[in-house]
Image (cartoon, grey):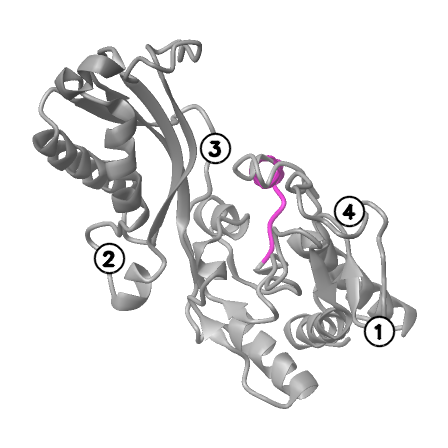
């Protein structure tokens, strides 16, 4: 139920819930209020039509997905369980059968300061960061099970602080910066590990310090927070095949299925349902192409088709009584 912050660049009110002939607009409408609403409307439609099912359907709406999935972790700890699940994160109605694990890391670069008049004698931590960041962002990790698994490896540096000392003093710009702190996030596939990913980053740092004598570099992971595990399900799973049939019935074509990107780079609560609860499921929801951007929106046609696809999948899995 949580959303990203509203950013710069919006041309409509992020909070107004604007609807025109093609789109529903608003912060979080793609991630993932449209999926939440589509699932609710699918179930309500079946109830109002008098449908009785042999199996139960449970809708779960939780907080804390952006904080590593703490809401779903708590839900699992409270004993909520099902034979199958569909996570409604935005995939543009594709059936996502695999996504990456997510982890957060910090890199510290320690150089040697001098006044700019003697910068040739310095070890510039900011210059080292400029060398390192593109290499980090281009990384894939060792040991993927297949090219499809390798295809959902990714690293992104999202925070950079550089100045004098670990206190990051900014009042002396003529001085060469001797300290940089980078924060980033990594993605690796099922079968790869966080320890292996951090080891690969350490290898990159050793190469950096070899190129820049006098530089120190270290990486650490954040161990004190829940992070999203990787998720994988067979394309032959009953829930995947039921979803594929529903998509074909609604749209008349085959549903895109697999470790599709960009959704394959997501971390989602499906990872906890799979890894912590041992549940079998798939990720499929409306929205995606306009997600996490100014004027976030969902196409109304996609939203309504998602309602229909969820309803048909419920009927297929739970069966009419």
Q: Give the number of the disc on residue 14.
A: 4
The secondary structure type at the circle numbered 2 is loop
> Is tag 1's residue or tag 2's residue first in the polypeptide sequence?
1
Look at discs 3 and 1 and give the one toward the viewer. Answer: 3
How far apart are labels 3 and 1 at the CA level? 39 Å
How far apart are labels 2 and 3 at the CA level? 23 Å
> Is tag 4's residue or tag 2's residue first in the polypeptide sequence?
4
> Camera-side residue: 246 or 100?
100
Q: Is residue 62 left or right of residue 118?
A: right
- According to the picture, the residue beneath numbered tag 3 turns out to be 226
Look at discs 4 and 1 and give the one toward the viewer. Answer: 4
> Is tag 3's residue or tag 1's residue first in the polypeptide sequence?
1
How far apart are labels 4 and 2 at the CA level? 40 Å
Category of crowding for the residue at label 4, using alpha-carbon neighbours closer than 10 angstroms: few (below 14), some (14–19), many (at least 20): many
Question: Residue placed at 66% from the left, 85% from the top?
Answer: 251
- According to the picture, the residue beneath numbered tag 2 turns out to be 144
The secondary structure type at the circle numbered 1 is loop
Instruction: Specify start and end residues of the magenta stretch as a single range.
Output: 71-82
- According to the picture, the residue beneath numbered tag 1 turns out to be 51
Whether tag 4 and tag 2 are in contact, CB under 8 A, the answer is no
> Camera-side residue: 194 or 237?
194
**Image-quadrant location for residue 223:** top left
Question: Residue placed at 84% from the left, 73% from the top?
Answer: 51
Category of crowding for the residue at label 1, using alpha-carbon neighbours closer than 10 angstroms: few (below 14), some (14–19), many (at least 20): few
Q: Is residue 76 magenta?
A: yes
Please provide percent x and percent y for residue 184: 39, 36
> Camera-side residue: 84 or 103?
103
Please provide percent x and percent y for residue 294: 66, 51
Look at discs 1 and 2 and give the one toward the viewer. Answer: 2
Whether tag 1 and tag 2 are in contact, CB under 8 A, the answer is no
Please provide percent x and percent y for residue 237: 47, 72
Whether tag 3 and tag 4 are in contact, CB under 8 A, the answer is no
């Amino acid at each position: 139920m949580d959303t990203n912050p509203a950013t710069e660049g919006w041309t409509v009110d992020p909070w107004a819930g604007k609807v025109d002939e093609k789109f529903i607009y608003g912060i979080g409408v793609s991630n993932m209020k449209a999926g939440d609403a589509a699932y609710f409307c699918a179930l309500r439609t079946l109830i109002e039509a008098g449908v009785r099912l042999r199996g139960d359907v449970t809708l779960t709406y939780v907080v804390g997905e952006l904080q590593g999935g703490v809401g779903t972790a708590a839900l699992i700890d409270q004993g909520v369980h099902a034979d199958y699940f569909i996570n409604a994160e935005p995939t543009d109605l594709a059936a996502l059968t695999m996504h990456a694990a997510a982890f957060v890391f910090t890199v510290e670069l320690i150089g040697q300061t001098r006044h700019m008049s003697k910068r040739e004698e310095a070890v510039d931590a900011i210059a080292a960061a400029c060398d390192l960041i593109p290499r980090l962002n281009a990384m894939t990790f060792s040991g993927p099970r297949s090219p499809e698994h390798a295809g959902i490896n990714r690293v992104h540096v999202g925070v950079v602080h550089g100045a004098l000392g670990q206190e990051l003093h900014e009042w002396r710009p003529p001085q060469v910066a001797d300290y940089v702190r980078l924060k980033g996030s990594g993605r690796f596939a099922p079968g790869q590990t966080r320890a292996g990913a951090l080891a690969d980053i350490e290898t990159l740092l050793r190469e950096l310090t070899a190129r820049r004598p006098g530089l120190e570099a270290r990486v650490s992971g954040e161990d004190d927070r829940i992070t999203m595990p990787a998720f994988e399900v067979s394309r032959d799973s009953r829930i995947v095949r039921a979803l594929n049939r529903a998509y074909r019935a609604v749209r008349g074509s085959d549903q895109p299925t697999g470790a599709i990107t960009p959704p394959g780079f997501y971390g989602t609560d499906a990872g906890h349902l799979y890894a912590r609860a041992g549940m079998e499921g798939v990720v499929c929801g409306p929205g995606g192409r306009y997600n996490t951007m100014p004027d976030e929106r969902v196409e109304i046609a996609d939203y309504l088709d998602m309602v229909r696809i969820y309803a048909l999948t419920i009927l297929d899995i739970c069966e009419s009584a």
